[in-house]
Image (cartoon, coloured by chain):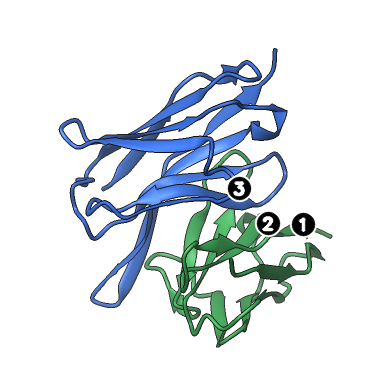
C-alpha cells in the first residue's frame, strides 16, 4: 500500500516562498518507471499539474509557473519537495503530491496524498 | 497543451438515474483517458483508465467509452455515494491535463 503525505506551512505571506514536502511510504521514488509530482487545485476549480519528474532525471514544470517553481528529491529518505517563489494570492490552493498513473500488465493505478491547503495572505 | 473540455459543468440528478458526462480533447489522445471522482476535502480517486477499463474495486455501474477526441463516463443507477465532482485527465501527451470538472448534484 503506497502512502503519500504532504507537509509544510499552511500560510505563506505574499512575495515569500511556498515549500512543501511529500513523504512516500510503500514505494521507492528511486524507481524510474514512476512519475512523481505535484498537482494543485484552486478553491472550487479544476486541477493542474505543477510539475513532475522521473528518477532518471526527466522533469517537467508547468510553463505558467516555470520561472518560480522547483522540485527536489531526497532518495535516501524517500521524499520529494516543491518550492514556489514569489507567491501571490493566486497561489492559494490545495496542493497534492502524487504518483502519476502507471500501468503494469495492463492494469493501471495512481496514488495521491490527502492534499495540503496553502493560503497566501499577509 | 491539450485542452480537455467537459460537459456539463453541473448535472442535477436523482438516485437511480443514469447520467453521462462527456469529455472532449483538443486533439486526438487515442484512448489515453482517465476518469476521477472527487469528494469535498479529498483527493481525486481513479475510476477508469484507458478510456474504458474499470479500476479494481470500482462499482460496475461506472463505465467509460470513447477514443480519439470524444469520451464519456456513464453512471447507471446513480447511488447516494456517487454525488461528487468528476474529472477527466488525458495522459497521451505531456503535460497531462485535466478537464474542468462536472459536479453531479442532487436534483
Q: Report which residue position mark 2 lands on.
A: B83
Q: Secondary structure at mark 3?
A: loop
Residue B43 vertical position relative to residue B30 in the rendered view, above or below: above
How far apart are the two marked residues, 3 and 1, measured between alpha carbons?
A: 32 Å
Check contact, mark 3 vs mark 1: CB within 8 A. no
Q: Colour of chain B?
A: green
The x, y position of residue A90, in whole percent, is 70, 34
Q: Position of residue B60 (x, y in %)?
A: 49, 75
Describe the element under mark 1 as helix, strand or loop. Answer: strand
Q: Is residue B53 above or below residue A15?
A: below
Q: Which mark is residue B93?
A: none
Query: Residue at label 3?
Result: A64
Estimate how packed mark 2 is, as few (under 14), some (14 to 19) or many (20 or more) residues with alpha carbons within 10 Å: many
Cα separation between marks 1 and 2: 6 Å
Asked if one can make out residue B54 in the rendered structure from this viewpoint, the answer is: yes
Which of discs 3 and 2 lies nearer the camera? The answer is 3
- Contact between marks 1 and 2 (CB within 8 A): the answer is yes
Chain of the residue under the numbered disc 2 shown in the image: B
Quadrant of residue B54 in the image? bottom left
Q: Nearer the viewer, mark 3 or mark 1?
A: 3
Q: Name the spot of residue B17 as percent of width and height, x first.
A: 73, 73
Chain for colour blue: A
**Which tag, 1 or 2, sits closer to the chain's start?**
2
CA neighbours of label 3 inside 10 A, class few (<14), some (14 to 19), many (20+): few
Viewer-closest of A47 and B15? A47
Amino acid at each position: 500500500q503506497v502512502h503519500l503525505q504532504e507537509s509544510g506551512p499552511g500560510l505563506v505571506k505574499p512575495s515569500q516562498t511556498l515549500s512543501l514536502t511529500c513523504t512516500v511510504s510503500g514505494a521507492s521514488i528511486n524507481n524510474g518507471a514512476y512519475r512523481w509530482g505535484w498537482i494543485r487545485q484552486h478553491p472550487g476549480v479544476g486541477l493542474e499539474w505543477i510539475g513532475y519528474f522521473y528518477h532518471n532525471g526527466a522533469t517537467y514544470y508547468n510553463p505558467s509557473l516555470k520561472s518560480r517553481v522547483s522540485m527536489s528529491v531526497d532518495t535516501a529518505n524517500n521524499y520529494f519537495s516543491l518550492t514556489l517563489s514569489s507567491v501571490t494570492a493566486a497561489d492559494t490552493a490545495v496542493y497534492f503530491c502524487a504518483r502519476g498513473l502507471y500501468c503494469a500488465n495492463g492494469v493501471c493505478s495512481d496514488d495521491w496524498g490527502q492534499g495540503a491547503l496553502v493560503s497566501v495572505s499577509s | 497543451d491539450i485542452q480537455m473540455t467537459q460537459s456539463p459543468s453541473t448535472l442535477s440528478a436523482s438516485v437511480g438515474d443514469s447520467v453521462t458526462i462527456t469529455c472532449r480533447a483538443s486533439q486526438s489522445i487515442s484512448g489515453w483517458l482517465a476518469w476521477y471522482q472527487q469528494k469535498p476535502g479529498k483527493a481525486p480517486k481513479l475510476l477508469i483508465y484507458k478510456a474504458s477499463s474499470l479500476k479494481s474495486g470500482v462499482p460496475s455501474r461506472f463505465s467509460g467509452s470513447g477514443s480519439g477526441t470524444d469520451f464519456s463516463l456513464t453512471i447507471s443507477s446513480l447511488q447516494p455515494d456517487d454525488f461528487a465532482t468528476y474529472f477527466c485527465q488525458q495522459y497521451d501527451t505531456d503535460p497531462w491535463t485535466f478537464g474542468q470538472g462536472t459536479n453531479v448534484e442532487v436534483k
